[in-house]
Amino acid sequence: MRKELEVISRATLFGGIKGEELEKLLVCMDSTRKKYRRQEMILSEEEIPDRIGIVLEGSVQVVQDDVFGNRNIVEKLEKGGLFGAAFACAGVRKSPVSVIAEKDCEICWMHIGKVLSVCPAACPCHQQMLRNLVTILAGKNVAFSEKITCLSRRSTREKLLSYLSETAKKEKKRHFVIPFNRQELADYLCVDRSAMSAELSKLRRDGVLDYRKSEFWLI
């Protein structure tokens, strides 16, 4: 159990909560853990989003698919990432997104009603978790605003440069690795993969950047 708690404690939602406090909190939240195989559906569109999920192992993608088969990758979450909180807190009746296991993963589930209902004892660890949740949601809003700015660019070239520029700023260096392969990057930027690959080749020829798979150098 101690090893399991060490894994869970690394999640941002439980920052500042350790040991016995975390163990009691998980019991209070009626938390459950479930493993998923690569490409398995974790949360589907139209499902009632009444739980929040924390990635304990592996990684997941939050996606939107239209009726024509086009996919938009909303975000990718690694170990410690949280999904479903905004929709669960808003009380929407149907999830507008799906969550898919990008790799074999393990998810910790908690019902949103348990998370938002402060226990009679008003325990400090529950208050800390709520503060962490607010911080996470605020961070997601900032990230989505940045993505909207990127997607508002008119051309595929401008979207690429906007995304790579913001990534370089976050990494504080011109050499970095992005969390997407070519198709995933195209889905994230909402552009055609072939057109995007052509623009990347042009940018390389123009001496703007260089790349090898998911590794980029801005010149």
Image (cartoon, rainbow, N blue to C red):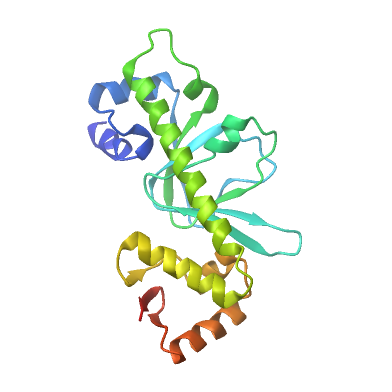
Q: Residue furthest bottom?
A: 205
Q: Quadrant of the N terminus?
A: top left
Q: Is residue 34 visible?
A: no
Residue 54: x and y in percent read 43, 40
Looking at the rendered image, the quarter that the C terminus falls into is: bottom left
Task: Residue at the far top: name it.
Answer: 120
Q: Which quadrant holds residue 104?
A: bottom left
- Horizontally, is 67 left or right of 35 in the view? right
Give coordinates of residue 56: x percent, y percent. 37, 43
Residue 157, position in %: x, y? 56, 77
Q: Is residue 26 above or below residue 218?
A: above
- When the figure is inspected, residue 11 is found, relative to residue 155, above or below; the finding is above
Total numbered badges shown on the rendered structure: 0
Which residue is at a point 52% across and 72% down the rendered structure image? 160
- Position of 103 with respect to 93 (left or right) is left
Locate residue 26, reporting x and y percent. Answer: 38, 25
Asked if residue 63 can be seen in this view, the reply is yes
**Horizontal arrangement in the rendering, residue 4 relative to residue 64 (left or right):** left
Question: Which of the pair 18/145 is nearer the observer?
Answer: 145
At 34% across and 32% down in the image, what residue appears? Answer: 14
